[in-house]
Image (tube, rainbow, N blue to C red):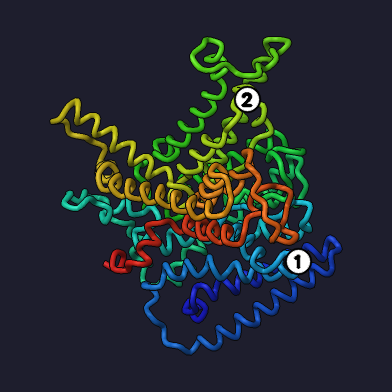
């Protein structure tokens, strides 16, 4: 085990990826697709042999200090590992090209879930490989967040550590990093194995439990497995299009999936969450409470809007929905609309990007014709820090909200003293300071990506939604809203009938690929990559 730990992290992950190719190979053999089974089997064997030879060549080298190379390693994982994953996909679809295959697997590994292919263009085993790549990407970020980013105080950990204090501000007592993280922070490879051994069994167990629950709800085996992996990784990858409750699961499947989306709202439900614990009780966790408030607000607004239109407070619903024949029917329609809005809001808040079977009913009930701005706002807020969710993250939003509340209190009562304990004070002061910096960097990133995407003849609305979807790692965002055509016939068989990702030019895809990586690693960590002195201190 020790020789393996001393190898470069990217080489260890390449070996695991090579072994993972045996899963779709076995599936293809079982369903009778022998050519595809040979592609995955031969690619997995060849990749295993190559990584084994590289491991033997590097085994005798002296162990160097790898603490300075953590962020370059993460960047290398997201740029090079999808190339290995893309080899069987490109071999199975020879007219799609290696670049499109690499882009597809990068989207899966970053848990973005954007796809160039219509579902009927891919064999079931390829859908399984895409879902498995997204699942491994979710596991990697769960482990890397606590093993690699937490000791450097980036990736969201900076707002709860004393390094996030505003210059000149007093450091609150009790805001030091978790002792367990400090105790195992000597070598990144050891940390990855240490935390991986704790997180992987829970991650896999939850996936299997959700898979069985979806099977009971009526989904087929492949659809249930892909949706289970897409839920835990928040990649939103599925072998079929449409609402997550279709065609067979219904509201029961959506309710189960909603329960398994909760771990994407707070790190305290995963091992290593003590670093981000701001309250002693789960029911007072700020991320969970803010998520509940946002989901409830979206559902309430969409359900109450027809009433406000009838009273003249807002523009009435047009065209008006026909009235239900009975009061019970009207109540049932309202409850269905509320559930469709709540589930879809939770899904986009966790950057999964699935919609409910009652989402269209919720839109029709409320008269919402352009949901893009609302869904994009939810994805930008994102889920919990150090989870598989993307976006700005709820804890940063909470820190800004608490800081704003405190500033209003000081206006009314200038001599007041705020309480809440050391963690709350840290969030209101240094945490809010860094959260504001990150929010500004995130906004600048969106503006930059929109400008680069708009170099090609793409409407500004489409460019904005594609940029937000890439930076928040929510690929289904661009599929859940009407998009203006942006085709260019250079994608081969990747020219799926949907006007968005597949028809984009190579330049635009490259820009969006960089945005996916930037959204997954986060802007502050990338700045630390170019300024190592900020995190070596």
Answer few, some or many: residues within 10 Å of disc 2's Cα (few below 14, many 20 plus, some between 14 and 19). many
- Residue extending furthest toward the left: 415
Q: Which of 328 and 441 is in front in this view?
A: 441
- The foreground one among 60 and 536 is 536
Q: In which quarter of the image is residue 125?
A: bottom right
Quadrant where the C terminus lies?
bottom left
In primary-sequence order, the first of circles 2 and 1 is 1
Q: Which residue bears the numbered disc 2?
A: 337
Q: Distance between the residues labelled 2 and 1?
A: 43 Å
* Residue 137 seen in this snapshot: no
Q: Which residue is drawn at 28% across and 47% down?
A: 433
Left or right? Give the position of 425 relative to 10: left
Residue 309 spot, x, y in % from top left = 55, 15
- Please give the residue where the numbered disc 1 appears in the rendered image: 95
Residue 398 location in percent, x, y? Answer: 37, 39
Residue 124 in picture, x, y percent from top left: 77, 57
| Displayed quadrant of residue 414 | top left
Residue 130 in sight in this render: yes
State the mark number for residue 368: none
**Taking 516 as reference, is 183 left or right?**
left
């Amino acid at each position: 085990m020790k020789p393996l730990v001393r190898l470069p992290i990217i080489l260890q992950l390449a070996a695991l990826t090579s072994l993972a190719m045996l899963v779709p190979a076995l599936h293809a053999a079982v369903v009778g697709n022998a050519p595809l089974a040979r592609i995955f089997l031969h690619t997995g064997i060849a990749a295993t042999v190559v990584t084994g030879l590289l491991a033997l060549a590097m085994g005798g080298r002296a162990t160097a200090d790898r603490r300075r190379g953590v962020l370059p390693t993460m960047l290398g994982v997201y740029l090079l590992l999808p190339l290995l994953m893309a080899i069987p996909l490109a071999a199975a679809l020879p007219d799609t090209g290696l670049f499109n295959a690499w882009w597809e697997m990068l989207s899966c590994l970053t848990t973005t879930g954007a796809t160039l292919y219509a579902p009927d263009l891919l064999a079931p085993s390829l859908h399984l490989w895409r879902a498995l790549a997204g699942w491994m990407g979710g596991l990697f970020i769960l482990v890397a967040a606590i093993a690699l980013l937490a000791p450097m105080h980036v990736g969201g950990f900076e707002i709860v550590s004393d390094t996030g204090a505003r210059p000149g501000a007093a450091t609150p007592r009790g805001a030091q990093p978790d002792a367990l993280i400090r105790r195992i922070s000597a070598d990144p490879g050891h940390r990855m194995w240490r935390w991986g051994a704790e997180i992987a069994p829970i991650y896999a167990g939850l996936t299997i439990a959700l898979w069985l629950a979806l099977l009971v709800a009526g989904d087929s085996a492949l659809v249930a497995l892909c949706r289970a992996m897409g839920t835990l990784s928040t990649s939103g990858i599925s072998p079929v299009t449409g609402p997550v409750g279709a065609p067979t699961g219904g509201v029961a499947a959506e309710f189960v999936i909603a329960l398994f989306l909760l771990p994407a709202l707070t790190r305290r439900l995963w091992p290593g969450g003590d670093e981000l614990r701001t309250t002693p009780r789960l029911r007072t966790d700020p991320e969970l409470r803010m998520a509940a408030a946002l989901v409830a607000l979206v559902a309430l607004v969409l359900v109450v809007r027809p009433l406000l239109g009838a009273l003249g407070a807002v523009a009435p619903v047009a065209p008006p929905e026909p009235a239900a024949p009975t009061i019970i029917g009207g109540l049932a329609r309202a409850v269905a609309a509320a559930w469709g809005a709540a589930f879809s809001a939770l899904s986009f808040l966790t950057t999964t990007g699935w919609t409910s079977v009652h989402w269209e009913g919720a839109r029709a009930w409320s008269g919402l014709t352009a949901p893009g701005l609302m869904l994009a706002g939810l994805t930008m807020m994102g889920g919990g820090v150090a989870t598989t969710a993307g976006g700005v993250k709820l804890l940063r939003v909470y820190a800004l909200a608490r800081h704003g509340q405190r500033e209003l209190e000081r206006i009314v009562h200038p001599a007041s003293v705020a309480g809440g304990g050391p963690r709350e004070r840290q969030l209101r002061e240094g945490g809010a300071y860094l959260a504001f910096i990150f929010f500004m960097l995130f906004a600048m990133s969106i503006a930059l990506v929109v400008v680069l995407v708009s170099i090609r003849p793409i409407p500004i609305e489409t460019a904005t939604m594609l940029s937000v979807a890439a930076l928040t790692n929510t690929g289904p965002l661009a599929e859940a809203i009407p998009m203006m055509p942006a085709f260019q016939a250079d994608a081969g068989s990747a020219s799926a009938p949907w006007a968005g990702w597949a028809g984009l030019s190579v330049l635009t895809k490259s820009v969006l690929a960089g945005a996916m990586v930037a959204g997954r690693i986060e802007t502050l960590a990338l700045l630390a990559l170019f300024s190592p002195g900020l995190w070596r201190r």
